[in-house]
């Protein structure tokens, strides 16, 4: 601790011995800093506040139909990329600042200055932005902010419109490309089906499924053919046991013709007769149901007689048309019916035989194609898979194009956001920079620090020994003794004058600083 205190004491003593160097540096630094503070032109700030309303009633209604962009992210990106060199070049032309540039270097310098001084700040999280700019000329600052505000709004609208048009144009190109691919795939698939239309693999069913269905149909047709053949054979046997006609004896020919049966009418008469008997047991002869039933029975009997008469006439015509050598008699109706049934059975057997033959042919063809079917099915699956993928991509692109077009229409109707100017561009009545009331104290402190540092460095460059211990440490030799200086009266007087001059110089610095600060305070209260 004593060592630290001793070193601090030595440093302070050296600074005091070189105090004139420090005072000179303090004056020089103070004058330079003061000149900078007072010669720097006043900067006036022009600012405007805008609000970006990203809420729209139309966008929730179009959810799922149109693409919903991240409006907040787009607005934030727009605010970050607004201060770009093309926009600054446009801003220079809008504010006539390019008239101040005589050369290309001056123009680039103006653009660089604008990019550094322009500020776009987000206020909170409610899409509220502040645009600010500093310039020595208040009207110029206001003009710059107004122009930048116009560029901000135009960039948001035109940029998004260009994005929508580019997206739609890209989707149109892709859709045309996929339409061509899809048409080529459909042609290949059609040619493949036409080329292999006889094979199961080129259709909708696989080979084994077709073979199973065909085998089942073939077995069913064979079973029906066997049933038809047995039915035909049974009819042949039954027909062989029946006589074609009923032969008539001479006595029977002289007698009256037998009564011809009418089975359908007789059956109805039997049913009505039984109903009449049932009604007579419950009602009298005058009951309406009894009367109606008897009337129907009478009509049916008359109809039966007419039918028997017609059949007799038909039988007589047939008998007269028979050849002379054929036995006379009535044709056997059972024989006739069996003969007709036999003809129908023969036709059914022929049809079923043709069907079975066709099934046998198709079955044999499928068996011959058994070796080619796996390869054909593999080729068909490959073609179908490529076609399915291309069709799915085509439909997806068409849906995306419709969504993009609908999104463009929605954005054209609502825009990215509703730009609302909360505070129009205005200029502060007092300069905002440089802040001389803050800079002057900093300049004063900096000049004092510079003077102390200069005195300390000069004392280290040209050191002075203050005691025996320091001399012994530096010389590495024993010190035998020391001679003390006893100042005289003239020497003490010079020291006092030197001290007064030093404090007078330091007081001058304080006085100058105080006057400058007072001037700054008074000047800051006055508007421009």
Image (cartoon, rainbow, N blue to C red):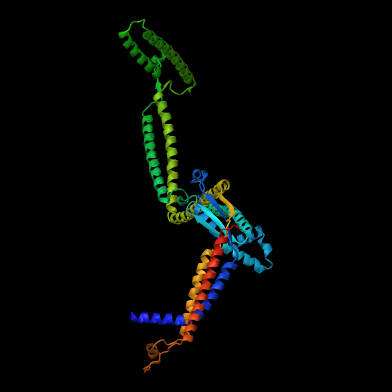
Residue 510, horizontal then vertical, whole percent: 51, 71
Q: Quadrant of the C terminus?
A: bottom right
Image vertical order of residue 101 relative to residue 162, above or below: below
With 155 as the anchor, is 220 left or right in this view?
Answer: left
With 109 as the anchor, is 292 left or right in this view?
Answer: left
With 252 as the anchor, is 497 left or right in this view?
Answer: right
Image vertical order of residue 225 relative to residue 71, above or below: above
Q: Which residue is at 39% across, 34% downward?
A: 232
Image vertical order of residue 115 relative to residue 396, above or below: below
Quarter-of-image position of residue 98? bottom right
Q: Which residue is at 44% across, 38% downward?
A: 351
With 286 as the anchor, is 23 left or right in this view?
Answer: right
* Residue toward you, 215 or 474: 474
Residue 253, horizontal then vertical, whole percent: 41, 15
* Residue toward you, 263 or 10: 10
Residue 434 showing in the rendered view: no
* Residue toward you, 48 or 463: 463
Q: Which residue lies furthest to the front in this view?
A: 489
* Residue toward you, 20 or 252: 20
């Amino acid at each position: 601790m004593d060592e630290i205190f001793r070193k601090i004491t030595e440093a302070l003593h050296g600074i005091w011995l070189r105090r004139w160097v420090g005072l000179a540096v303090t004056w020089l630094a103070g004058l330079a800093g003061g000149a900078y503070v007072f010669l720097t032109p006043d900067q006036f700030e022009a600012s405007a506040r805008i609000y970006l309303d990203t809420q729209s009633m139309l966008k929730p209604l179009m959810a799922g139909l149109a693409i919903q962009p991240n409006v907040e992210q787009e607005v934030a990106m727009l605010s970050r990329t607004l201060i770009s060199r093309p926009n600054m070049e446009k801003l220079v032309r809008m504010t006539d600042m390019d008239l101040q540039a005589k050369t290309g270097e001056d123009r680039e310098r103006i653009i660089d200055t604008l990019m550094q001084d322009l500020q776009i700040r987000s206020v909170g999280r409610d899409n509220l932005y502040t645009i600010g700019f500093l310039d020595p000329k208040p009207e110029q600052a206001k003009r710059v902010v107004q122009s930048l505000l116009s560029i901000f709004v135009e960039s948001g609208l035109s940029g998004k419109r260009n994005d929508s048009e580019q997206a739609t144009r890209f989707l149109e190109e892709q859709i045309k490309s996929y339409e061509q691919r899809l048409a080529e795939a459909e042609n290949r698939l059609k040619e493949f089906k036409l080329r292999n239309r006889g094979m199961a693999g080129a259709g909708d069913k696989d080979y084994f499924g077709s073979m199973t269905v065909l085998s089942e149909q073939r077995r069913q047709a064979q079973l029906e053919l066997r049933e038809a053949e047995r039915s035909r054979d049974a009819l042949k046997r039954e027909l062989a046991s029946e006589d074609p006609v009923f032969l008539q004896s001479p006595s029977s020919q002289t007698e009256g013709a037998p009564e011809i049966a009418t089975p359908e009418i007789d059956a109805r008469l039997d049913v009505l007769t039984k109903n009449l008997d049932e009604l007579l047991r419950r009602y009298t002869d005058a009951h309406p149901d009894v009367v109606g039933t008897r009337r129907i029975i009478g009509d049916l009997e008359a109809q039966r007689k007419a039918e028997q008469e017609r059949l007799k006439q038909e039988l007589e015509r047939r008998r007269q048309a028979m050849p002379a050598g054929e036995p006379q008699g009535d044709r056997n109706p059972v024989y006739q019916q069996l003969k007709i049934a036999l003809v129908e059975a023969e036709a059914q057997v022929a049809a079923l035989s043709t069907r079975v033959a066709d099934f046998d042919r198709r079955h044999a063809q499928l068996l011959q194609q058994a070796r080619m079917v796996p390869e054909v099915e593999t080729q068909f699956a490959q073609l179908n898979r490529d076609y399915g993928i291309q069709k799915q991509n085509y439909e997806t692109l068409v849906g995306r194009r419709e969504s993009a077009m609908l999104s463009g229409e929605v954005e054209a109707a609502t825009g990215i956001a509703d730009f609302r100017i909360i505070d129009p561009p205005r200029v502060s009545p007092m300069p905002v920079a440089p802040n001389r009331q803050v800079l002057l104290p900093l300049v004063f402190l900096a000049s004092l620090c510079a003077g102390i540092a200069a005195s300390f460095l000069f004392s280290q460059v040209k050191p002075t020994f203050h005691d025996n211990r320091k001399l012994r440490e530096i010389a590495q030799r024993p010190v035998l003794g020391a001679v003390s200086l006893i100042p005289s009266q003239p020497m003490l007087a010079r020291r006092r004058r030197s001290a007064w001059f030093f404090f007078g110089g330091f007081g001058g610095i304080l006085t100058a600083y105080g006057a400058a600060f007072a001037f700054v305070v008074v000047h800051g209260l006055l508007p421009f």
